[in-house]
Image: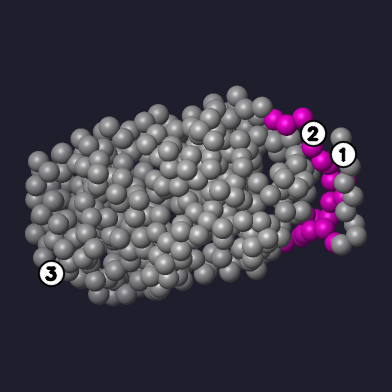
Amino acid sequence: MKKALILSCSTGQGHNSCARAVKEYFDRQQVDCTVADAFRFVSEKFARFMGEGHSFMYRHIPGLFRWGYGYSKKHPALFKEKTLIYKILTAGTLRMYQYIAKEKFDTVICTHVLSAIMLTHMQKTLPLALKTAMVMTDYTCYPGMKATDLQRYFIPDGFLAEEFVKCGIPREKISVAGIPVCQEFYKKIEKTDAKRLLNIQAEHRHLLVMCGSMGCGPIAMMVEHLYKNLPEDTEVSVICGTNERLQKKLDRKYQDADQIHVAGYTKQMSLYMDSADLCLMKPGGLSVTEAAVKKLPMAFINAVAGCEQYNIEYFVKKGGAVSSDSPEELTDQCIRLLQSERKLKEMENALREYRRAEGAKQIFETIELLNTKKIYWKDTTYVERESDGFPQVPAGQVKYTRV
């Protein structure tokens, strides 16, 4: 493997974070690695629509996302060839093919089921000599998996293998690698030092509140409930992600509250986790894995459900997390947990069993052993699109040569 492309999708930061973690390790192995948004092969407008639409739905109408996920789970035929969804996703097949061929990638890895569907279609219609794989970013099998056919599927835990087999993935294509997280999360700063760096009193309990990169969920309500009931020896850090409106609202309300610290999008998440005694969070697959690697006890806000419901069930069953459908009840649980050293220690010990070898390392070593196909197609015409460097092919200017 000399040159790898990682295809993410602009639907939240979890898939992108996973892609960055894989790229980080591949870079260390001297592999030329690029991360791209697969939706941009369809069009720039489509990528923006999917990204902004996903953020809006998560923040304002999570019930619609929950319904859509459940519906697609029950109706896998939605992703079959000739359906509208399939036609839209595969509209960028030619541009994807030309980009991969021109850049001479020998490996393509997907961190989203939709990019995996797009890559599968490309390999069916315009096959290239590639190693192909998909990395799961949640503790479940996604709707649409039946429409994919790649060489290797990396799943978070062996207990999920049967679920993937039922979705049509051959057992011999499945490997257990955990969910890759960036290297910084494998490093640990002493809790007292981390608190000092964040201006948290060392002797105080520290509750970290975060709802993903988009800052969704009932954060304002929960912070208000916490503020009214916080013991004097407890401080709260609230991470609002890219939700600037929420950050400004909380900043105004708690500007004089010494126990409440409000932050926006941060690149210091590893430091915040090292400083925390408990994390009240939206259960995105990457976020919960980062916390689990840190052995940080978790309390889950079921803000969106969908695939995140399975993340909740996974870690609650392991004993490393608690959850509630009631925001008030969950915040009360957090306060009780912060006052119980014994219970926090039990949750931390439960997460010790989770810690596994570096996921990106296992992915790299497994892909290195894969074989590539011997027959492929070469596109002899490339026309650059100035805005992003992806190929734009005008009608009538494409020629294919079999080699």
The residue at 87%/46% (across/down) is: 400
Residue where numbered disc 3 is placed: 228
Quick check: is 243 in the magenta stretch?
no
Q: Nearer the viewer, residue 302 or 203?
A: 302
Q: Is residue 375 left or right of residue 107?
A: right
Of pointers 2 and 3, the one earlier in the residue sequence = 3
- Highlighted range, magenta: 372-394
Q: Nearer the viewer, residue 87 or 21?
A: 87
Q: Name the quadrant containing residue 265.
A: bottom left
Helix, strand or loop status at disc 2? loop
Q: What is the magenta segment's predominant secondary structure?
A: loop
Q: Which disc number belongs to residue 375? A: 2
Q: Amino acid at mark 1?
A: Arg
Q: Is residue 69 left or right of residue 50?
A: left
Q: Are circles 2 and 1 on residues that touch, CB within 8 Å? A: yes
Helix, strand or loop status at disc 3? helix
Q: Nearer the viewer, residue 55 or 91?
A: 91
Of pointers 2 and 1, the one earlier in the residue sequence = 2
Q: Nearer the viewer, residue 263 or 366?
A: 366
Q: Separation of disc 2 and disc 3 at Cα?
A: 67 Å
The residue at 14%/57% (across/down) is: 333
* Quadrant placement of the C terminus: top right
Q: Separation of disc 2 and disc 1 at Cα?
A: 8 Å
The residue at 13%/51% (across/down) is: 338
Q: Position of residue 71 (x, y in %)?
A: 46, 63
Of pointers 1 and 3, the one earlier in the residue sequence = 3
In this rendering, is residue 133 above or below 240? above
Quick check: is 379 in the magenta stretch?
yes
Residue where numbered disc 1 is placed: 402
